[in-house]
Image (spheres, rainbow, N blue to C red):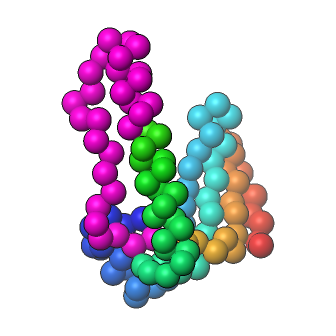
Amino acid sequence: MDYIIGRTFSNLQANPRASLSFIDSNTLIGYQINGRVEIIDSGQEYEEIIKELHHKQLDLSIARVIEGVTKGRAHKSYEVAIPEQFVIFKVKMEEVVEMRPSGTLKREKL
């Protein structure tokens, strides 16, 4: 998502390709997903995603309140808000790269 519709949005309009990286902190194996990006800013899929985000927003807010009450801790803010204007980036996976701690890469084209 791009909440502020800024540089990421502009970059993906010019070159609709993205690379998402993450790591399994237990195994230290990293993964990279590469692919073409579709910008979703309206329509049925957009509305369905907004609905799902609102449910997650509510669940997270409730969990934070319960955690604060049960542990006697206060959060600075219980508000979890979704901005009024944002776009969604949908990445069509074209390649997955597994990166091992040894530096070994395993690429798989999809």
Return the residue found at the far left.
Answer: 76
Q: Is residue 92 left or right of residue 3?
A: right
Is residue 20 part of the magenta span, yes or no?
no
Above or below — where is 16 with respect to 71? below
Tag count in the figure? 0
Looking at the figure, which quarter contains the C terminus?
A: bottom right
Query: In the image, what residue occupies the spot 35% across and 17% down?
Result: 69
Chain part drawn in magenta? 61-89
x%, y% of residue 70? 40, 13
In terms of image quadrants, where is residue 72? top left
Residue 34 higher or lower than 13, as above or below: above
Choose between 20 and 52: the one closer to the eye. 52
Please give the name of the residue rendered at 41% of the width and 23% of the height, measured from the top-left corner. 66
**Viewer-proximal residue among 69 and 102:** 69
Residue 5 shown left or right of residue 14 in the figure: left
Residue 41 position, x and y percent, is 42, 79
Q: Which residue lies at the image location 69% right of the left edge and 74% below the top edge?
A: 94
Percent of width and height locating residue 77: 24, 35
Query: As displayed, is residue 22 above or below residue 2?
Result: above
Q: Please identify the quadrant where the N terminus is shown.
A: bottom left
Residue 35: image location, x then y, percent: 61, 74
Examine the structure image and report whether residue 68 is included in the region drawn in magenta.
yes
Give the farthest residue toward the bottom: 14
Classify residue 95 as left or right of residue 23.
right
Seen from the viewer's position, the closer of residues 45 and 90 is 45
Q: Residue at x 43, y 54 (%)?
A: 54
- Which quadrant of the view contains residue 92? bottom right
Residue 97 drawn above or below residue 109:
above
Q: Can residue 20 be seen? A: yes
- Among the 4 quarters of the image, the one containing residue 9: bottom left
Residue 18 visible, this angle? no
